[in-house]
Image (tube, rainbow, N blue to C red):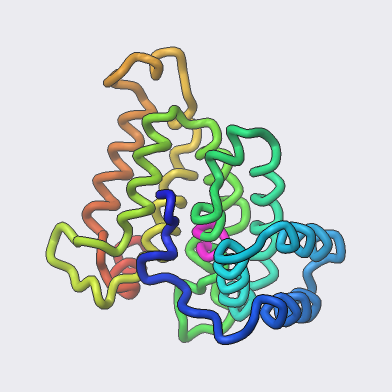
Amino acid sequence: MADGFETSKGPGTAKAAPQQLQAQIDAALLRTGVSEAERTRISAFLKSLSGAELQIELLMLQHVLASPNAKAAMGIYDRVLGMAKESPRAAQRLPPPVRHALARGVADPRATTTPGHEGILGQTQAELAARTLGHMPQAQFEQALALLSHAGQGGAHGFNEARADPWAERAYILKFIAQRSERLRATPADSAKGADTDASRAMDEISGIADDMRAMSRTQLIRLNS
């Protein structure tokens, strides 16, 4: 997890200097209709980054802002950034790769032939997934990170990894986490190693679904989860 999701089928190499990319993103935020408060917070955050960290963030934002769902995606990007600042635990539970998966889950349309079609995640669902990652037991959080990291790799049923869409897989994993939010709340029983709890059972369900769909094409994923 330390190297993030971008190292596998990542956003690519920048074709412009970070300063140029940031200027392009500022202009795109304005065109998209993102509020002044959101633009100010996003700009301040980008200015706090440098080097490879900044490059990855700018490339991800470039992708999201090219989406027909850019405004909604930038809304969740801004909210999750704020959530990550609420506490050291929140920062640990919402590292950049997870924040990127949430934003792309809202941004990337399920049906690429239909302009403006909603993403796999809605804004409310993406925010709920983020909050669930924050309150779930540590063992289940680590399991969720492993599923997100392995998306698109080594399909259990021989699916074609070349056609896999790891970001769509991550969006569905986050969707399943949001759908089980109440079950994934930590309880005193979770402190016992290997305890059979509602949270552990819920995460095992998600793991089974994620294993079954790993390395599917985007078309198969959408059909399976419609």
Asked whether, in this view, residue 206 is left or right of residue 63, the answer is left
Q: Is residue 194 above or below residue 145?
A: above
Looking at this view, name the residue that lies furthest to the front.
51
Q: Nearer the viewer, residue 152 or 70?
A: 152
Q: Is residue 125 above or below residue 161?
A: above
Q: Quadrant of residue 55?
A: bottom right
Where the C terminus falls, by quadrant? bottom left
Asked whether, in this view, residue 106 is left or right of residue 190, the answer is right
Residue 180: x percent and y percent? 44, 38
Residue 123: x percent and y percent? 62, 57
- The residue sitting at 29% across, 40% down in the picture is 205
Q: Main secondary structure of the magenta part?
A: helix
Q: Is residue 77 magenta?
A: no
Q: Is residue 23 above or below residue 156?
A: below
Looking at this view, name the residue that lies furthest to the right.
36
Asked whether, in this view, residue 201 is left or right of residue 51, the answer is left
Q: Quadrant of residue 171?
A: bottom left
- The residue sitting at 79% across, 74% down in the picture is 33
Q: Quadrant of residue 161?
A: bottom left
Asked whether, in this view, residue 115 is left or right of residue 224, the answer is right
**Which region is colored magenta?**
101-105
Q: Count up the numbered dots.
A: 0
Q: Nearer the viewer, residue 51 or 133?
A: 51
Q: Is residue 225 above or below residue 187?
A: below
Residue 74: x percent and y percent? 68, 64
- The residue sitting at 38% across, 52% down in the picture is 148
Residue 199: x percent and y percent? 38, 28
Q: Is residue 104 magenta?
A: yes
